[in-house]
Amino acid sequence: MINEVRPTALIADDEPLLVQALEKALASVWPELLVTSKVGNGESAISQLLSGSYDIAFLDIQMPGHSGIEVVQAVIEEWPETEDAKPTPLFVFVTAHDEFAIDAFELAAIDYVVKPVSDNRLKKTVERLSQSWQVRQVEPALNTLVNQVNEFVLESRKEEQKQEKKSTPNADWLEAVRAGIGDTVHMIPVKEVIMFEASDKYVVVHTAQHEALIRESLRNLLPRLNPAQFRQIHRSTIVNLDYVLAALKAGGSKMTLKLRDTDHTPVVSRLYRHLFKAM
């Protein structure tokens, strides 16, 4: 007898009752799905998903350790890029917070479901997941092509959702940051910042003259920076596009940036390489 291949899933949520409810609902609308792991924090989710044992991940947004958004960023950035590597899991966000939908679709999430989840809404999610998973099973060699098509579709969806946001210019973009250099606090104009780099509990502010420290997370800093000037290129790095001289390929699909006025060559994760393909 031929063993039936069934999709495997991980649920990451720090509220046990909601995990139980989602698992029960999934068992009802998609009996073939095997929920093989349940974790309550972002660190465990990253570790489990990078094991390569899961086809699908259902993630809450706000969890201890790392948010669901940060979990997906970490998994995608650390996923093997060898030719025989299996595709990353299919990601679905199940959350009470609807304001992170654009961020989720930027990460190529299959769906974004707002709690409480109705059976009808979950059925639609399962239909999308099932179709994507079945395509992967039919012909693994088509994964690259499928991913390219998915990227195009998701990029279009992302741009549509961003259109309204872009149509209203933000007059309050950050103009300077208060940063420490030794025992002195300086006000550094953001136009002089080459890049921001996360380091432990601080963010390092790189300029042509010096490096300074601010007690700020990149997650909080990024929305306050003008996207026409600053772009995130890695979960730990934001660069000033005015200082980018070239995008360089270095071994396989790895990409780094050559920047003006610094010897730093930050790595561009696969999530953001499309921003520099024309260079």
Image (cartoon, helix red, strand yellow):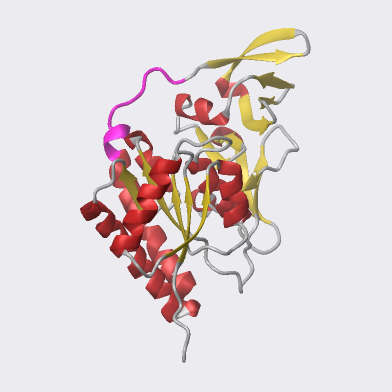
Residue 18 in the image: state x and y as whole percent. Answer: 39, 43
Residue 136 in the image: state x and y as whole percent. Answer: 44, 73
| Residue at the extreme right | 182
Q: Is residue 207 left or right of residue 116?
A: right
Q: Nearer the viewer, residue 246 or 129?
A: 129
Residue 46 in the image: state x and y as whole percent. Answer: 59, 49
| Residue at the extreme top | 184
Query: Residue 216 sits in which quadrant?
Result: top right
| Residue at the extreme left | 120
Q: Is residue 211 left or right of residue 7?
A: right
Compared to residue 192, the image places residue 144 above or below, namely below
Res. 269 in view: no
Whether 139 is among the magenta residues is: no
Residue 44 in the image: state x and y as whole percent. Answer: 60, 47
Q: Residue at x 42, y 69 (%)?
A: 146
Q: Residue at x 69, y 8 (%)?
A: 185
Res. 11 in view: yes
Q: Which of 62 and 29 is in front in this view?
A: 29
Whether 170 is among the magenta residues is: yes
In the image, which residues are magenta? Answer: 163-173
Q: Nearer the viewer, residue 219 or 3?
A: 3
Compared to residue 122, the image places residue 169 above or below, namely above
Compared to residue 62, the image places residue 93 above or below, namely below
Most prominent secondary structure in the magenta stretch? loop
Q: How many marks?
A: 0
Q: Nearer the viewer, residue 65 or 150?
A: 65
